[in-house]
């Protein structure tokens, strides 16, 4: 094989650097203020998926787990149509959302710009998979942790190209240095149709688009809209903690306070089933400064023992109620992330508060307040669906589609349970009303998780249901 010239952008100039197959151009050492990034030329990518295969082989990934994905964008009017491929892995962002949200500080931005993930620190909570607007981190079931691209750090250290770039037959993928401050000031080259805006995390991947991209395009994967994972342990955690807080706020006796304490403890125990490595759950307290998940764990971890103490010491009941409300707030805030547009709204906070207001007062005998909470929960649901309806972006408009079509029966059930609970309440059947409202809130929270459509890169027409690209 002969050396092939590769175009690389260094600072603001394009230089042509001869390389031998599989070896790095002269990029070491980095100059001050620079980091590595991927470059991708869409005009020369042929969609062969060699990069995906090379990445999987290099990193020993099991079937269904992918760190680099090849997606497709198509458009035009027959006979002048185009299908273009995009190969993308981790963008090693300047403001990496996976890093700032991780409760265990398992992520690190290295001096060379690589966003590295430390497997030993990961508890498998999967919060980073929600935070990343490109859906890059992926939960790897065989290891029970999240994993992601590290730009083949061992190969970089030996002066070799990452496996994906080395395997690309057309040299569509490159590795190059970028001036950090210049890129932060102008990162428009990281944007393309149907890709989340680069300003969300300051993605550093430079994308070269062809000159003849059709004015109107669609992502080839948009047709395949389907529900997300239900996350039943989180349904359990969020509903029970919100109900517990509602009970604490309206408690009028030792029995009510005991119910709040029991619900809080049951919620915390059940939530451990969500973690890939529950034995390391204590590590979730490491990032109180930046992570709402760390704050949620801390607040509910404090709330449960205070609620238990309040059973015998009524003077602690107001403190328990206050800490419980703060926990519900933190719980809602951790879902308000750009990577999940259906959740990224203040309505999420109102929905979580409404659940506590709907059920908690019914447990403590405040029927009017419970009825108001039940109505509020339905109003928030309708408001969010209307907010997203008709939006051309599948990550937004897809949620109302799931509610109205594929999951229509469950949507109807959620509304019927709430309305029937209200009717039972007017008839004086408080216990039946509480049971119906609780069932409605559980179905509603399940819908909350399964109807969210992640922001993502464009996928392929024959995309897999495994890995990160769901």
Image (cartoon, rainbow, N blue to C red):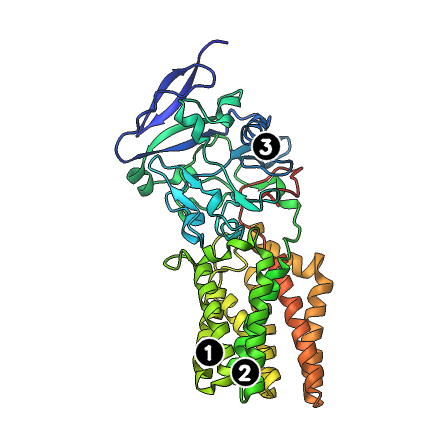
Is 5 placed above or below 340 here? above
**Which residue is disc 1 drawn over?**
320
Among the 4 quarters of the image, the one containing residue 411: bottom right
> Quick check: 236 left or right of 155?
right
Distance between mark 2 and mark 1 Cα atoms: 9 Å
First in residue order: circle 2 vs circle 3: 3
What residue is drawn where x is 50% and y is 78%?
Answer: 307
Is 73 placed above or below 262 here? above
Q: Position of residue 35 (x, y in %)?
A: 34, 34
> Quick check: 278 left or right of 318?
right
What residue is drawn where x is 54% and y is 50%?
Answer: 124
Please say whether residue 423 is visible from this viewpoint.
no
Distance between mark 2 and mark 3 Cα atoms: 62 Å
Q: Which mark is residue 257?
A: 2
**Which residue is disc 3 drawn over?**
83
User: Dot 2, how many residues are within 10 Å of its Cα: few (below 14), some (14-19), or many (20+)?
Assistant: many
Label 2 secondary element = helix
């Amino acid at each position: 094989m002969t050396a092939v010239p590769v175009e690389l952008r260094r600072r603001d100039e394009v230089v042509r650097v001869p390389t031998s197959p599989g070896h790095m151009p002269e990029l070491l050492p980095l100059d001050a203020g620079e980091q590595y990034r991927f470059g991708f030329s869409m005009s020369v990518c042929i969609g062969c998926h060699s990069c995906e295969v090379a990445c999987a082989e290099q990193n020993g990934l099991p079937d269904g787990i992918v760190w680099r994905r090849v997606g497709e964008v198509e458009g035009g009017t027959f006979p002048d149509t185009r299908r273009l491929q995009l190969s993308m892995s981790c963008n090693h962002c300047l403001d990496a959302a996976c890093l700032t949200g991780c409760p265990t500080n398992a992520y690190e931005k290295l001096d060379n710009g690589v966003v590295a993930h430390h497997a030993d620190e990961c508890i498998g909570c999967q919060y980073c998979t929600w935070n990343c607007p490109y859906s890059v981190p992926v939960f790897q079931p065989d290891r029970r942790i999240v994993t992601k691209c590290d730009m083949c750090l061992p190969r970089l250290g030996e002066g070799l190209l990452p496996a994906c770039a080395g395997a690309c037959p057309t040299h569509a993928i490159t590795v190059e240095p970028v001036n950090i401050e210049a890129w932060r000031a102008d990162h428009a080259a990281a944007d393309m149709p149907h890709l989340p805006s680069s300003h969300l995390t300051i993605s550093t991947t430079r994308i070269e688009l062809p000159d003849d991209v059709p004015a109107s395009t669609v992502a080839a994967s948009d047709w395949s809209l389907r529900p997300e994972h239900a996350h039943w342990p989180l349904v359990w955690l969020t509903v029970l903690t919100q109900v517990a807080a509602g009970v604490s706020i309206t408690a009028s006796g030792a029995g009510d306070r005991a119910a709040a304490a029991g619900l809080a403890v049951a919620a915390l125990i059940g939530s451990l089933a969500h973690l890939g490595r529950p034995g390391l759950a204590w590590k979730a307290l490491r990032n109180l400064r930046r992570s709402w998940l760390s704050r949620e764990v801390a607040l509910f971890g404090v709330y449960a023992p205070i609620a238990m103490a309040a059973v015998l010491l009524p003077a602690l009941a107001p403190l328990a109620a206050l800490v419980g409300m703060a926990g519900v707030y933190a719980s809602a805030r951790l879902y308000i992330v750009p990577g999940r547009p259906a959740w990224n709204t203040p309505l999420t906070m109102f929905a979580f508060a409404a659940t506590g207001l709907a059920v908690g007062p019914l447990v403590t005998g405040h029927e009017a307040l419970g009825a108001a909470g039940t109505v509020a929960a339905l109003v928030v649901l309708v408001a969010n669906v209307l907010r997203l309806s008709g939006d051309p972006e599948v990550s937004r408009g897809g949620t109302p589609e799931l509610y109205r079509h594929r999951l229509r029966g469950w949507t109807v059930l959620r509304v019927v349970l709430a309305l029937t609970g209200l009717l039972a309440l007017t008839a004086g059947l408080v216990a039946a009303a509480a049971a119906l409202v609780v069932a409605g809130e559980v179905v509603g929270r399940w819908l909350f998780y399964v109807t969210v459509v992640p922001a993502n890169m464009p996928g392929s027409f024959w995309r897999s249901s495994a890995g990160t690209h769901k």
